[in-house]
Amino acid sequence: MFVKRPWIIAVLFIGMAALGIVWWLSLNNWSFKGMVPSRESQHFSRHADSVEFSGVYAIRGPGYTGTLTVRRAGDGYNLCWQLASGSVYYGNGLAIGDVLGAVCAVEGHKHTRVMAYKKEADGLSGLAARMDGDKLGCEKTADAERIKASTYPLTGTYTVQGSHPNQASYKGEMTLERTGATYTVRCRASDGSGYCGTGFAVDEVFVTGYSNAMGVGIGVYEINSSGLEGRWLYTDYSRLATTSQIRAGSERAAK
């Protein structure tokens, strides 16, 4: 008579599971890291510092040439444009994955621009928009291929939760309205503060920038199934050229 032995099935199952774990570890340098998603990886598929943007780049944009110097500064980057015309202007930026979002003051802080760059070998390729502008211009190094803006349907109103660099939390609302090649971004926090800026997307990253009487702000967000999630910073005009330790806040925006 044949006698069923359930324990044999259990042993076979455990053995197969063990072999699966050994195979997985062999593909991950025999490390358990990544088997259980970390708190950060649950939020970001594009890690903030997966690409290093520091360097000096010979750039060309619409009607100008010059040099862009990108320098690491704490949680983000300082940027300095020195144009062949003699103009010099400064900005700060934050990165998610291979996209660096930045905001800069132009012409003595009278105008600002928001831009997004991607690293390409030893060069950069970027898109830029004037604040309140509905068009995108290209700024890149000579051999880099021109990048394109993404066409994600981001229009709508989002509920915002975030924290300042000092960890103080806040809530608010963000509205994105399509305006040509860019979005008009309006954000209002529960404490009454807010801004109106300009944004656009490159790959799965949304970049927005704004300015007011005292300084400029930049936000970079990963586009995911629930909305937007990323980091932001604000810098006074007087500190754009000298900031050495950028501290970023964090923010989630869900529809």
Image (cartoon, grey):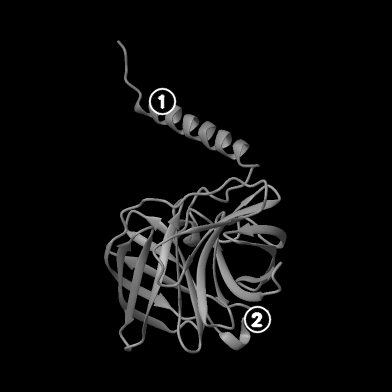
Give me the disc on residue 243: 2
Look at 59% across and 45% down and name the residue there. 145
Q: Is residue 48 left or right of residue 163?
A: right
What residue appears at the point 51 percent right and 54 percent down from the top-left corner?
Answer: 46
Say if mark 2 contacts mark 1, CB within 8 Å: no
Residue annotated with mark 1: 8
Where does the N terminus fall, quadrant-wise? Answer: top left
The amino acid sitting under disc 2 is Thr
What element does badge 2 sit on? loop
Q: Position of residue 171 (x, y in %)?
A: 33, 79
Q: Residue at x 59, y 73 (%)?
A: 92
In this orientation, does residue 134 appear? yes
User: Is residue 233 visible to the viewer in this orientation of the structure?
Assistant: no
Residue 132 point in image, percent of width and height: 40, 72
Task: Please tell me whether mark 2 or mark 1 is closer to you in this view.
Answer: 2
Residue at image point 50% right, 89% down: 214
| Location of residue 78 by image quarter | bottom right
> Circle 1 sits in a helix, a strand or a loop, which is it?
helix
- The disc placed on residue 115 is none
Which of the two discs, 2 and 1, labels the residue nearer the N terminus? Answer: 1
Q: Quadrant of residue 47?
A: bottom right
As measured in the structure, the alpha-carbon distance from the residue carrying label 2 to the one carrying label 1 is 66 Å
Q: Nearer the viewer, residue 21 or 178?
A: 178
Which residue is at the far right?
A: 56
Using the image as rendered, state which of residue 19 and residue 111 is in the foreground: 111
Name the side, left or right, on which 230 lies relative to 51: left
Q: x%, y% of residue 64?
A: 63, 62
Q: Residues within 10 Å of mark 1 (few under 14, many from 20)?
A: few
